[in-house]
Amino acid sequence: MDYLKSVAPTQILSERGSNLVVINPGSAYVRIGLARDEKPFNVPNCIARYNTGKPYVVDQMLNTQVTTNQHVDRERAYNTAASLLKIPYLDESSSGSASRKMGRIDGFNKPSTTKKDTVFPWTDVYEDVQISPVASETSADKGEASATKAAPDVTDTKDASESKRKYRKTIFGEEAMTISPNEPYCIRHPIRRGHFNVSPHYSAQQVCEDLTAILDWVLLEKLHISHSERFSFHAVLVVPETFDSREIKEMLTIVLGGLRFNSAVVHQEGLSAVFGNGLSTACIVNMGAQTSTVVCIEDGVSLPNTEKILPFGGEDICRCLLWIQRHYQKWPQIRTDVLAKPIDMLMLNQLKESYCDIREGEVEAAATVHSYEDGMPAMPHKTTLTSLNVPPMGLFYPNLLVPEVFPQPPREWFQDYENMLEDTWNMDFGGGGNMGLPMWDSFAVSPSKPKKEEKIGLAEAITSSILSAGRIDLRRKLFSSIQLIGGVGSTKGLVRAVEERVLRTIPPTEAINTVEVLPSRTDPTFVTWKGGAILGILDFGREAWIERQEWMENGIHKGSTKKYKDSFYIEGQAMYFINP
C-alpha cells in the first residue's frame, strides 16, 4: 500500500491523467471522467428517442407479476427483519411505546446538506429551430412536406427568420428519465441487471448504438472532448463482474470503434476498488442499483472462485420502501409507478438515501412525496414514512425484494464464451518480480459457462466468498478487510449490520471471531472509478493496452457470422499489485 501511494499520488494523477478517460458503465448510471479529476460525472445510463410507435418504456414489456408464494415469502421476510429490529410485525399495530434506540452510523456518509425534497421538473422536449425565409421558399418550391403548418409570408427581408418548435431527436441522462409519459418518446436502458439489455424488444445492435450515443453525449457535453480530439485520448474501461466476455468485447468495440479512442485497457470493478481505496487485499462487496457482487482480492489478484453475483440492489430497496408505505397506508393516494414513470424511481431513490437507516426501534420520518401526473407540475404531499429500517434489511433477507420488475436478460445472445480476462496471461511486463506470471494458473476456470446469480442474502454471500479463498490466514485477513462500495454502500447503519450478521453466519467450526468493515476513503459510489484512474496511470504504456487499429483489424471478424476472433488477439490484461 505504501508503494501504491508513492507511485500514484495526486500530483501524478493530475499530470498524467489529462488524456485518460475512465469509463465505468453500470445498470442505472455510467461514471465517466478524466483520470486527473477528483470525481467523475455520474449520469443515468438512459436514452430517450423520439418515436411515436414504441412503448414509453421498453422494459415495461418484460415485467413479470408477483406470485402468491412471493407475497407470502415477502411477508415472512418482513417479520423476520422486524423481530431483529424490535418493531411490530407486518400485521401488528404499533403500540407507540417502542423504544427508539439510536444505532451507530458507520462508514462514509453523504453530507448533511443532502436535498431531501428536491422536485424533478418535467423535461422540455422541444427545441427551437431558426428557419430562414429562403430555406422555407426553397422547400415549398420543391414540394417537400412539412411536419408543421406553413408560416405566414415574411415581408421584412432584413435578417428575417422564423422560429419553429420541434421535438428533440434524442434526450440523455436524467432528462430522459424525467420525460412525461404523454410525450412521443421511447425510453431505453441499455444495461439492465448487470448485463446488456438484449431482449425480443431490444436488439443487440440497438443496445450498442444506444450505449455509443450515451457515452458520446457525455464526452461532448460534459467533458468537452470533440470527435476530432478523440484520437489523442485513451480509455480505461472498468467493467462490472457481471459482464460476460461478449459484453466486454462489445464495450471495447464501442470505445475504440464508435467513440474512436486511440487505445483502451480493461479492468474489473473488484480489482479497481482495492486500488481506489489504497489496499491490496480485501473482500469487495459492490452494491449497485440492480445487482450486487462479492469478490475477494489477494495482493492485487482477483480470486475468481470467490465471486458471487446477487440479483438485487438499490432500486429493489426503493420498491420495497414503496410497498411498505402502501401497506401501512402512509403513501398518498397518487399514481406512483416505477415501471411506467422513471421519474418516480428518481423520487424513491432520493427518499431511500435520505431516510433509510438500519437500527433498532421504530424509524419514522416526516417527508414530502411528490406526484408526477401526465406532464402536470409536481404536486407535494406531506406524509409520515414508517418502518424505514426494514427496506435495506432486504440485503440480508432478499425475499423482501421481490423481483417483479425487469428480470435478468435472456442469455441466448451470449454464445461467445471465450473469456478475454482469463486466457491471455503469458505476457512479459518487464521489471522482474512476479508481474509476468499467469494470474489464473492455480484456479479452475470454466469459461464455457455463463455467470450465474445466487439468491442468497448478503451475509451468506460474503461468508461463502471468503471461505472459498483457501488458506485460514487469508480468510482471517479477508474477514477483517471487508469493503462496502456502490451507491448502497452509503446506507446508514449498514456497516454494523454487515459485521454482526457475517459474524453470526460463519460456521462454528471456523476459528474466526473477528469481522471488520474498513471505512471507505472516498464516496463508495466512485471507488471503482477512482481505482480505474489509478490503474490507468500505473500501467500506462504497457502491453495491456489495446490499440484501436489492432482491435479493429485483429479482434473482429469482418463479414463473418462470428463477430469476434479468438482471444489470442485480445490483450485485456487486468493489472494487479503485489506488496514488495
Image (tube, rainbow, N blue to C red):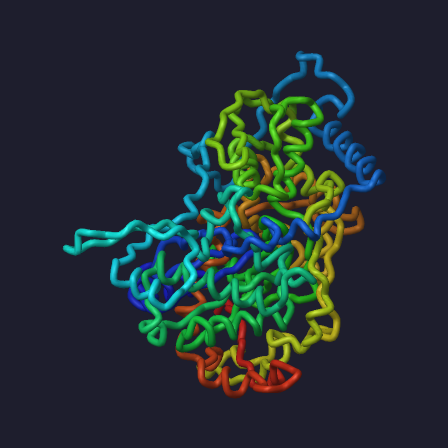
- What residue is at 36 percent from the left and 72 percent from the top? 230
Q: Nearer the viewer, residue 179 or 488?
A: 179
Which residue is found at the position 48% from the left and 66% from the top?
A: 212
- State the residue in front, 566 or 377: 377
Image location (x, y in percent) of residue 112: 42, 32
Q: Quadrant of residue 298?
A: bottom right
Q: Based on the displayed image, in which of its 4 quarters is residue 352 positioned?
A: top right
Residue 490 appears in view: no
Outermost residue to the left = 158
Q: Residue furthest right?
A: 69
Location of residue 102 in the rendering, given as x and y in whole percent from the top left corner: 57, 24
Res 21 visible: yes
Q: Position of residue 129 (x, y in %)?
A: 32, 54
Judge left or right: residue 346 versus residue 160: right
Residue at 29% across / 55% down in the picture? 130
Q: Is residue 301 above or below residue 109?
A: below
Residue located 57% across and 55% down the image: 189
Please indicate whether residue 330 sits to the left or right of residue 373 in the image: right
- Note whether 329 is above or below 573 in the view shown: above
Tally of numbered discs = 0
Comparing 550 with 484, the one in front is 550
Q: Is residue 139 left or right of residue 290?
A: left
Q: Position of residue 35 (x, y in %)?
A: 38, 62
- Foreground residue, 212 or 390? 212
